[in-house]
Amino acid sequence: MTGSDPFRNSSELAAWAAEVLLSRGIDEVAGWRMLEYWVNVELYRAAQEGKAGPWRHLGNYEQPYVTDHPRPGAKTPTKWIDLVLAEPILTAPERVVWMELKDLGRNVDTVRKNAKGLGLDLAALWRLRPVETQQTWLDPPKHAIDRGRLGEWNTLAPGLQQARHLISQIVIVPTSESALISPDELETIWLSSFAVRAKVDHANVIAEIGRAATQKFAVHALVRDLPR
């Protein structure tokens, strides 16, 4: 795992995420209902320990980004990303990947609602605006300001504009709940919701969602270049 680049394609990303989470004991904490936060920490840890090749986290917390497609009803164009990794130099990255994470849930209503939400999150990532995001970091509006992080944003923002940007999602689904939704149905709802929100033909723009598994979880992952 150390030294590899999991962001080469969706299949490799799914396999990497499953390996990291299995090594950190996800099957032993399968009953914990706040696993999304645990997954966030463990994938962050893996990157910081060099287990995601050259990638490291860009900053020390969730980061704001600007999108043309925030969640329906949102009052601002700003969303906050779960993880944002960059390589090889944080202040002058060649690539930046914006990553959303999701634990799909434990009952049929939650699973289907969250599957649709995956599409809304993907639509937001699809219309992420690096230039406007850079400006938000340099001069945060009231709804995104965090005065304790202005130094971090001023240091990291200049590198955003010239980087190649990727977008990514990682989703975990307890296999004990697999009867609630099949992998094919999950991905159909996910991409259909995305297509409606982003107003695109998803069959033409999303080539692949990768799949992997631990004993107790299915892992779905997607990574691709941010469309220009």
Image: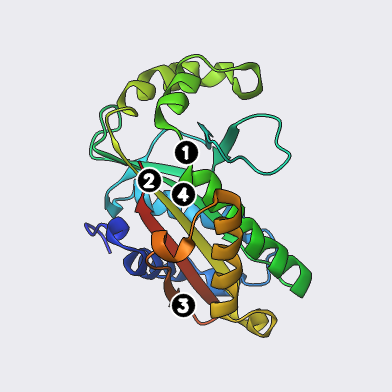
Q: Could you tell me how far apart the alpha carbons at marks 2 and 1 are, in whole angstroms? A: 8 Å
Residue type, mark 2 in image: Leu
What is the number of the mark on residue 213? 3
Q: List the residue tagged with mark 4.
A: 99
Q: List the residue tagged with mark 2.
A: 226
For image coordinates 54% across by 49% down, the residue present is: 123
Q: Mark 1–mark 3 contact, CB under 8 Å?
A: no
Q: Earlier in the sequence, mark 4 or mark 3?
A: 4
Near mark 2 (Cα within 10 A), the count class, few <14, some 14-19 or many ≥20, is some
Q: Could you tell me how far apart the alpha carbons at marks 1 and 3 are, in whole angstroms? A: 29 Å
The answer to whether residue 101 is left or right of residue 15 is: right
163 above or below 195?
A: above
Q: Earlier in the sequence, mark 1 or mark 4?
A: 4
Dot 3: what SS?
Answer: strand
For image coordinates 58% across by 64% down, the residue present is: 192
Q: List the residue tagged with mark 1.
A: 128
Residue 135 % position (x, y): 45, 19
Q: Would you say residue 157 is visible in this rendering?
A: yes
144 above or below 128?
A: above
Q: Mark 4–mark 3 contact, CB under 8 Å?
A: no
Q: Earlier in the sequence, mark 4 or mark 2?
A: 4
Which label sits in the foreground, 1 or 4? Answer: 1
Q: Would you say residue 82 is visible in this rendering?
A: no
148 above or below 106?
A: above
